[in-house]
Image: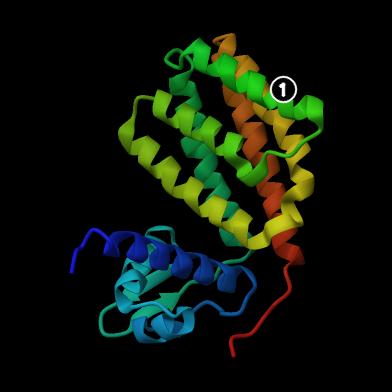
Amino acid sequence: MSLVASKPVSAAGKALVVRGVIYGLLHRRWTGGERLTEQAAAGLFQVSRTPVREAFLELEALGMLQLKRNCGAVLLSFGPRQLRELYSVRTLLEVEAVRLAVSRIEKAAISRMIVEFERLQAAGADDVDWVLDRALHAGIAHASGNLRLCDEISRYGNLVQTMREVVGTRLSSVHSTSLVEHLEILYRLKARDEAGSVQAMRRHLEIAGDSALEVLSGLTPQRVD
């Protein structure tokens, strides 16, 4: 059997488990301290144990669970305090990235992003699936020139995107505000304004954190059957 075909299947299964566990923690289907074995997760998400194992490693790196020998995974609490901490770390990382990127990021790339964001703003349209949002944050991280910093920002960005997918339309009202904030970051970057870029990024992530907390507080608790 070819291993080439199995990789996408494993990746899809891993993504399914990651999303499912985050969904369960956000909706308080599980509480901190509960145990989830590979076998139980494989049955719950209808995947093999290999993608479960890969998903558990990623979730541990994201601080969503802790792996213990001969015990499987112990789920960690995820509530307002943990969400605040997540956004605090994300802010530290991305503020440093934008500070480093100010003198490195290409103005042509900034101008292209400005055109895209202004087009959405003029049309009163949403940034569907947060495509431009992710491109902006990834572009700044890459332009920082620090690969380790870029990797960490990508890790947190993936978690935030998964959380967005879990809560779905509950964040729809945030799009228009985010467009304004993103444009402010881009305008400051285009002007090579380090202090302004840092301030705009910090403010953007503070607002994003507040919005995420508001959504989290409105999620309905669910139980695992």
Residue at the outermost front position = 1
Q: Viewer-proximal residue, 97 or 154? A: 154
Q: Viewer-proximal residue, 195 or 72? A: 72
Give, as a three-letter code, the residue at label 1: Glu
User: Where does the N terminus fall, quadrant-wise?
Assistant: bottom left
For the point 56% across and 51% down, the residue is 161
Locate residue 112, reporting x and y percent: 57, 18
For the point 75% across and 57% down, the residue is 170
Circle 1 Cα neighbour tier, 10 Å, few/some/many (<14 / 14–19 / ≥20) = some
Locate residue 55, reporting x and y percent: 38, 66
> Dividing the picture into quarters, in which one does residue 82 lie?
bottom right
> Dividing the picture into quarters, in which one does residue 2 lie?
bottom left
Q: Secondary structure at mark 1?
A: helix
> Dividing the picture into quarters, in which one does residue 150 lie?
top left
Side (left or right) of 204 relative to 104 = right
For the point 46% across and 13% down, the residue is 106
Q: Is residue 195 visible?
A: no
Locate residue 92, reporting x and y percent: 50, 38
The residue at which mark 1 appears reads as 118
- Reply above or below: 59 against 203: below
